[in-house]
């Protein structure tokens, strides 16, 4: 089975359909087995057809469990929180169709069951990043902590406490909502970090820290403990496509007029679909 990872859809349902068709064609050239397709999060929001994108991903996942899976990104978590009444929608959201849909509760329930991290064939997949203090095993364990909270009976209370930029650095002593919030922020929001691992949430319009600052992309921190595995992530459209021996960045700005990207994790072959500029880039990602 060939495995393909796809970057942020953000409601670009048409482009997702085209890319999945290209993946199916590519996989057929290598054998009869259907491909495994893994989305790195942000299925919805900002794009033109979030409802269709979400319905399609849910249908694909339920039709063949384990072969099609999607991580939770920050926009996906935001939808769950808004639908639950734990957070207000923002002016830049394009979630109205989902929130008004007759199957809204089923869609949100499906999203709540999605993972925040996956480990597949020596690849660690997350939406945004990995705290430098974590190795792959700890990343998976901490992701499971959040997943348990999101799937548990007090999930709405968890969502009410999920928002905020503090604590901005992982500490093993963190407990309760502060611990879960720090995990969520690393896995779904992180881009730049200070040398001590403190996460910066202000700068998002560039692929590097501001001139004169000591901020680095999280994956360039020299003490990062996940250097022994390949980390696959999205979330950072200003960074664009990244292909390194131990790093795959897949957010190539689909909703901003870039491309929707898939990478075959078996051989690093690249599949892309051009996208219209559905949203004018203003730093909001």
Image (tube, rainbow, N blue to C red):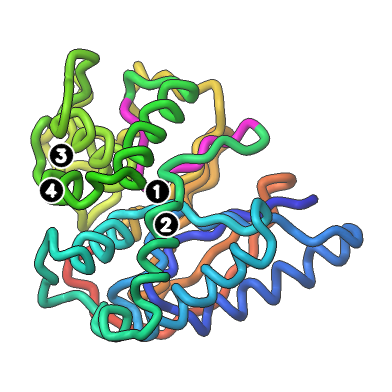
Q: Which residue is drawn at 19% across and 44% down?
A: 158
Q: How crowded is mark 3: few (under 14 residues within 10 Å), some or many (20 or more)?
A: many
**SS class of the residue under badge 1?**
loop
Q: Which mark is residue 127?
A: 1
Q: Residues within 10 Å of mark 1 (few under 14, many from 20)?
A: many
Q: Write down the quadrant of residue 88 in the picture.
A: bottom left
Depth order, front residue of 108/195:
108
| Magenta stretch in the rendered image | 122-131
Depth order, front residue of 52/111:
111
Q: Write down the quadrant of residue 276 in the picture.
A: bottom left
What is the distance, in whole Å, between disc 2 and disc 4 at their CAs?
18 Å
Is label 4 or label 1 in front?
A: 4
| Mark 1 or 3, nearer chain start | 1
| Residue 80: % across, % down | 27, 62
Depth order, front residue of 67/273:
67
Is label 2 or label 4 in front?
A: 4
Q: Which mark is residue 200?
A: 3
What is the distance, in whole Å, between disc 2 and disc 1 at their CAs?
5 Å
| Residue 14: % across, % down | 52, 84
Label 4: which residue? 163
Badges 2 and 1: C-beta atoms under 8 Å apart? yes
Q: Write down the quadrant of residue 85 in the picture.
A: bottom left
Label 2: which residue? 41
Q: Which residue is drawn at 62% across and 38% down?
A: 120
Q: Is residue 129 magenta?
A: yes
| Mark 4 or 3, nearer chain start | 4
**Residue 214 appears in view:** no
Q: Is residue 235 magenta?
A: no
């Amino acid at each position: 089975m060939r495995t393909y990872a796809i970057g942020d859809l953000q409601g670009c349902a048409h482009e997702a359909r085209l890319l999945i068709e290209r993946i199916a064609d590519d996989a057929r050239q290598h054998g009869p087995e259907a491909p495994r397709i893994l989305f790195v999060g942000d299925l919805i929001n900002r794009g033109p057809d979030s409802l269709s994108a979400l319905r399609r991903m849910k249908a694909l996942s339920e039709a063949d469990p384990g072969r099609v899976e999607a991580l939770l990104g920050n926009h996906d978590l935001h939808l769950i929180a808004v639908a639950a009444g734990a957070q207000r929608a923002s002016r830049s959201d394009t979630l109205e169709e989902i929130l008004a849909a007759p199957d809204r509760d089923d869609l949100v329930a499906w999203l709540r069951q999605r993972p925040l991290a996956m480990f597949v064939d020596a690849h660690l997949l997350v939406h945004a990043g990995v705290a430098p203090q974590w190795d792959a095993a700890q990343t998976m364990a901490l992701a499971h902590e959040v997943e348990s909270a999101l799937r548990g009976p007090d999930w709405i209370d968890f969502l009410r406490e999920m928002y905020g930029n503090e604590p901005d650095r992982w500490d093993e002593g963190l407990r309760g909502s502060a611990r879960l919030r720090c995990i969520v922020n690393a896995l779904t929001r992180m881009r730049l970090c200070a040398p001590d691992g403190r996460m910066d949430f202000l700068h998002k319009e560039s692929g590097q820290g501001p001139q004169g600052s000591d901020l680095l992309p999280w994956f360039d921190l020299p003490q990062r403990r996940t250097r022994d595995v390949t980390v696959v992530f999205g979330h950072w459209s200003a960074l664009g496509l990244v292909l390194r021996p131990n790093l795959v960045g897949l957010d190539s700005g689909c909703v901003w007029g870039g491309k929707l990207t898939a990478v075959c994790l078996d051989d690093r072959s690249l599949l892309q679909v051009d996208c219209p500029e559905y949203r004018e880039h203003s730093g909001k990602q």
